Amino acid sequence: MSEEVKNPNYWKSLGELARNEEYEKFVEREFPENATELNDKVSRRSFLRVMGASIALAGFAACRRPVQKIVPFSKQPEDLVEGVPQYYASASPFQDALNGIVVESNSGRPTKIEGNEMHPASSGNTSIFGQAEILNMFDPDRSRYVRKDGERSSVNAFTEFCSNHFSNTDQNIAFISEANSSPTYNRMKGQALDQFSNAQWITYEPFGEDNALEGTNIAFGERLRTYNKYDEADVIVSFDDDFLNPTGDKNSVENTKRFTDRRRVMSEDDDMSRFYAIESTFSITGSNADNRLRIKSGEIEHFIYALAAELSNSVSGLSAFSGYSNKFSDHEWIAVLAEELLNNRSNSILTVGRDHKPELHATVAAINVALGNDGQTVDYLNVPHIDNQNNREAFAGLVEDLNNGNIDTVVLVGTNPAFTAPADLNFDEALANAGQVIHLSNYYDETSKLANWHINRAHFLEAWGDGYSYAGTRSIIQPQIEPLYSGISEIEFLNIILNGEQAKGYDLVQNTWKDYYSNNFTSQWNKALHDGLAGEETFSASSVSISSAFNSQASDFISNADSSEGMELVIRPDSTVFDGRFANNGWLQELPKPMTKITWDNVALMSKKTADKLGVKEASLGKSEVEVISITVDGTTIEIPAWVQPGHADDSITITVGYGREGVGRVANKTGVDTYPLRTTANMHFASNVSVEKTGETYEIACTQDHNTMEGRSLLRHATLQEYRENPNFSTYESAYDAEMPGVAYAEEHGEDDPLSIFDPIGEQDYPDYEPQWGMSIDLNTCTGCGVCTIACTAENNIPVVGKREVSRGREMHWIRNDRYFDGDVNDPKALHQPVPCMHCELAPCEQVCPVAATTHSDDGMNQMTYNRCIGTRYCANNCPYKVRRFNFFNYSEEFLTGGDDPEIIQMAMNPEVTVRFRGVMEKCTYCVQRVNRAKINRDIETNGETMKPKDGAVETACQQACPADAIYFGDLTDPESEVVKTKKNNRNYLLLEELNTRPRTSYLAKVRNPNPKLA
């Protein structure tokens, strides 16, 4: 072997790739610039002003027992033991799709959300939004009371108003609603349309499935929901569809589960699907592709038509595309994709991004049917609550009616069109022409301020409800706590409007389900509550065929394909705040975005080539000062920071919405830039021929991509499926570095079992036989980089949110980070993801240097922290080669609890099983020791003291339980049948920085890709 160690070229940022002098200075600092004790008064004041509930929930000590407002313990319930959490099945709504959840409740207050293993939409897992809903519920910035013309009022006053106002059933009423699958809600919707002869009902979502529904209407003559079964496909082709991201697809949890099930490789003999991504913006989904092609969003249309034309010669149903050609017809990808799809008929999936126009959805649906995928890998579902109208056209028509003074009353349920509606509709001006405006919402937001009546809404964890999953599993939403701010649910709200009186949500939901359960109602109702779902029934799949009118319509829209010339602007929902509804959530604001690692802001993404053309420089290391550009579309201009994103399409700029809000909450206010002014009815997804100029200004971005760097040492190992089959041991140190592992020769010479380590064992700790020995393994082949592990860890372990300023100083507190690496050319690299928690090393470098023995090993092998011993020297963080330790700079608990808002509510959100850290204390991943100890106690009780070793699977860490890709394995290393032991015996298993021989208990399974060799 070569004496010179080979170092694979993985890089996190352009600065790291350049390896310039500035970068070398940056990485020499163990703690980033200014990462010292916070002592300036400006920081302290601004910190408390902007952080709201999130920092207090996540990191402030409670000096007295949380106030319990709904379960009095003067007479303790028989089924409740203080200190032992209870679990309740429910469902979490996101748009009109429910995910089954299980809510952990401590002393009657919800503290953690997990997926429901029995529910097919979640299978025990969650998304980042599902995890963050706990913080949403305890947000003190939520609306607290009813307002009439901006002044405080009451539900009783609103009820009296409705009783009188809605007695006139002939008035022109417009209901504008967010998407909602609730059978109870839709029963009331039908009642409203029957009761008010001149009523119209419009479902408005700024990023909904309207275009997809209209596409199936063009292709099949009916509006059907597309349901892709990624686990049953051998070939997947995605056109600008970020289906693994909850902001790109509301069924992302199930999508991820299905997708990764077909990608799981446990031996060199296993097979895996092949995934092609064609996209403009480097997305989570695109980063997991085997082959990725970057083109402008405006060119996606031409690419799809060229592929349809290529396939039309071999399949029926695509005759309209026969003979068609454009600039992509001779592209190498067209012939390769056509060959792959034809060789995998009935075993492939084509999917297109939700926001592309209906004609593209129609074409992709037609191709799927032509290839025989319908009924096999793709189902087209009949969804009962989908409106039989084009809601985007209906919404524009309503605005016209408002402008003409034709609407007497507008009722808005949940949605916020004053902020999210297309800018050219001038919705706020149109709304002023209505006689009465009534708005139900979680916050006193942009639309609420225009309404005559604002009704504060109850969070779903506080209210009864029901609904369907994306595929049609029916569930009941049961409340976990009384409404903190006396809000009402959407069904209680509609009942007041329709009947002029108040009713309990429980009764309204039961009335609906009594029709569903015609026999043995009580027992079936209780079973549905217990299980979290009504049964295995789902929406029926339609037997589709390409409509006779499709080909004539196709001839029209391919001849009128949009031009994609000039610089284009792509408008997307944000990866962490979505359309703005999560903007006041500190956990999500501080979660680094999957591909850029930016926090607390939105930016204009562009490729290196585009940046060079515009004269824009990339962010400098350690400073994150970036240039600001102005973007003009149809006479409207915004200014926004520019960010150079490797892998982005050239001559294309991507911006995200949801930021720049004011008067909503302390976290959201004035965070980022409002980009909705550039989104119009003509430019809902992208705009062409936009004007871009530098402003000469700069803006600071808090980006974590260069934090916790490991001096350029390679931490990733990956190979193609073919390489894996040829060399099953590719992940070993010798194969990865083309060099012998340091210390091996010395060990062999001296008869040692383990390689020489630079760290000395401390007394060679002997572990008791009766204790389990914990370990973890992370499969990089299934990890998608979504970040839900980080949010789940934050929620479980009371981890503080520190804010933009502190993140920019390198002080983020996440116990598990998700590194994103690039491999290859700066313009068209591959991306790889790697979650990095504490390694729990046997020869822990941190333990070697702590002067007060605050970090030691437990009897069950975990590297543990004794917080009240720690004196804050930070030697342990300096000596940790993995950079997984976090120092707590803050101790504002006393000030916050005496001067802040609602300390009782904030304390109620804390996980009582996890110690709250104070200033001057180092913290890190604990392997969720509170869960481990709970399982050991339970096992000890179950076996009458015979053993305390939990059964395999009895302990799941928070990150493991939340992960929809099932990428994390955790268990007892002394159990040879445990899943974690099996993965560690896999030939893809390797250790981070194993040349240091710290003997980590956390290991990784190397990534395997399955690219088409014709496109490699």
Image (cartoon, rainbow, N blue to C red):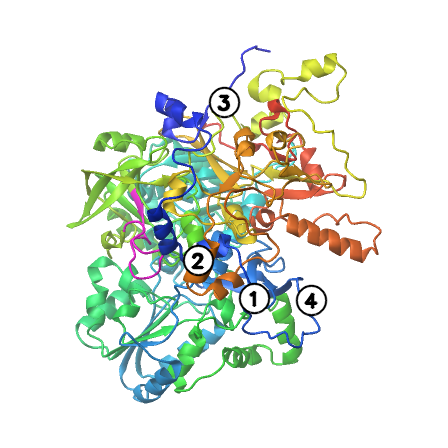
Check residue 660 for magenta coloring.
yes
Residue at horizontal 80 percent and vertical 43 percent from the top: 770
Q: Earlier in the sequence, mark 4 or mark 2?
A: 4
Q: Counting other residues with Cα less than 10 Å from the Cα at mark 1, is it few (<14), some (14-19), or many (20 or more)?
A: many
Q: Nearer the viewer, mark 2 or mark 3?
A: 2
Q: From the image, which quarter does the C terminus lie in?
A: top left
Q: Counting other residues with Cα less than 10 Å from the Cα at mark 3, is it few (<14), some (14-19), or many (20 or more)?
A: some
Q: Is residue 181 visible?
A: yes
Q: Counting other residues with Cα less than 10 Å from the Cα at mark 2, is it few (<14), some (14-19), or many (20 or more)?
A: some
Residue under numbered circle 1: 109
Image position, residue 311 (x, y; %): 41, 41
Q: Nearer the viewer, residue 626 or 859?
A: 859
**Where, by quadrant of the figure, is residue 81 drawn?**
bottom right
Residue under numbered circle 3: 8
Q: Nearer the viewer, mark 4 or mark 3?
A: 4
Q: Earlier in the sequence, mark 2 or mark 3?
A: 3
Q: Which residues are magenta?
A: 654-673
| Residue 1007 horizontal side relative to residue 805, left or right | right
Q: Earlier in the sequence, mark 2 or mark 1?
A: 1
Where is 587 relative to 470, above or below?
Answer: above
Residue under numbered circle 4: 81
Residue at horizontal 54 percent and vertical 60 percent from the top: 63
Q: Secondary structure at mark 3?
A: loop
Which SS does the magenta portion mostly show?
Answer: loop
Q: Nearer the viewer, mark 4 or mark 2?
A: 2
| Residue 210 horizontal side relative to residue 875, left or right | left
